[in-house]
Amino acid sequence: MTVNLYSDTQTRPTAAMRRAIAEAPVGDEQRGEDPSVNALCERVAALLGQEAALFLPSGTMCNEIALAVHCRPGDEVLADVTSHLIHFEAGAPGALAGVLIGTLPGRRGIFTAADVDAAGRAESRHAPRQRLVSIENTANLGGGTVWPLATVRAVADAARRRGLSVHMDGARLMNAVVASGTAAAEYGRACDSVWIDLTKGLGCPVGAVLAGGRDFIEEAWRLKHRWGGAMRQAGILAAAGLHALDHHVDRLADDHANARRLGEGLAQLPGVAVDLDSIATNMVYLDVSGTGIDAADIVARLKEQDVVMGAFSAGSIRAVTHLDVDRAGIERAIAAFAAILGR
């Protein structure tokens, strides 16, 4: 069996989740008549401390709809220089919402209120109007970094002093919740919009849920329809999300423990450098430049042993733990890596 550490998006629905999907009560989601979708949206809105929520096909669609609701074409969004918005959404902020992204120099994906203040623009007809600050929690390229709640609140206060709204890309927010012990609603209430992905650590096959105020979600519905995301009997997908919230949240702690074990094991290998202090959740970034072997070559050799990771550069590899990889799989991955390096 393959040990797939490429991403937590590689999870497959469990047998119990498949049963929930098969037995889901359904209706016309677009007309508000799907009981499973309605239950999921109500639950996520409460979970995130917001008034309402909207079921969407993907997390990227959550981000793009949020930007388009909060902003107008030509406006500026402030986000960390490593953010998903910039690197992994195919230029959608500019193409769909027509916004500019002003980058903030965070540390491992986390910026501060002082960074927001320093990036502030004076009102001018020559400059883009700043509308939004976007926070990514956990921060992917930061290594799965967890935002401290105090930092989120301070950033939100700084944003609102300047008349800006606050959005949270919460693709892996539940990882942050489990790792920090901070309730999701505490994070959510600091923001004007926030979403969670169902297809990563929660293990669903499709979907994400965007939450915010009732007026925000009403306008988000319009964009969902305009951009082709309106669905019909989507309860078969929403049922997976409900099952995940019941059964797959607390177990994220297992993924975090497995990530630490993986990092510790690989750090013992010659030429592999791992910042163990940076392993906060379910991601492990490896510096393999000291091995003398290109990262893509290592990844190809690992695949020959049924272990999958991702090369991020010539000297960097990322591994992400999830519910389809148990402790035995972690040990297999360490052994495969060791074999490649001749140890």
Image (cartoon, grey):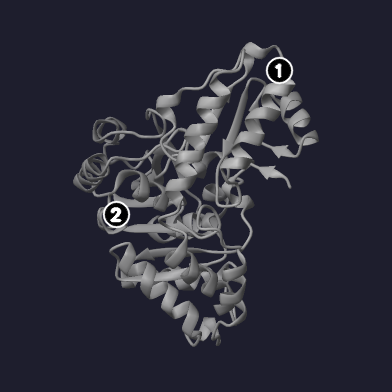
Q: Which residue: 44% across, 25% down?
A: 276
* Image side of residue 78 versus residue 236, left or right: left
Q: Position of residue 41 (x, y in %)?
A: 41, 73
Q: Residue at x 32, y 72 (%)?
A: 214
The amino acid pointed to by label 1 is: Leu
Which x, y percent locates residue 296? 73, 27
**Picture quadrant of residue 289:** top right
- Residue 6's quadrant in the figure? top right
* Mark toward the viewer: 1 or 2: 1
Residue 331 placement, left or right of 53: right
Name the one closer to the observer, 36 or 71.
36
Q: Nearer the viewer, residue 323 or 50?
A: 323
Viewed as shown, does residue 332 lie left or right of 286? right
Callout 2, which amino acid? Cys
Image quadrant for the C terminus? Answer: top right
Residue 341's label in the rendered image is: 1
Q: Tell me if residue 21 comes above or below residue 167 in the rendering.
A: below
Q: Which residue is mark 2?
A: 191
Residue 154 x/y as whole percent:
21, 41
Image x and y of residue 192, in percent: 30, 58
Quick one: SS at disc 1? loop
Mark 1 and mark 2: Cα distance apart in space: 46 Å
Q: Secondary structure at mark 2?
A: loop
Up/down of 177 relative to 338, above or below = below
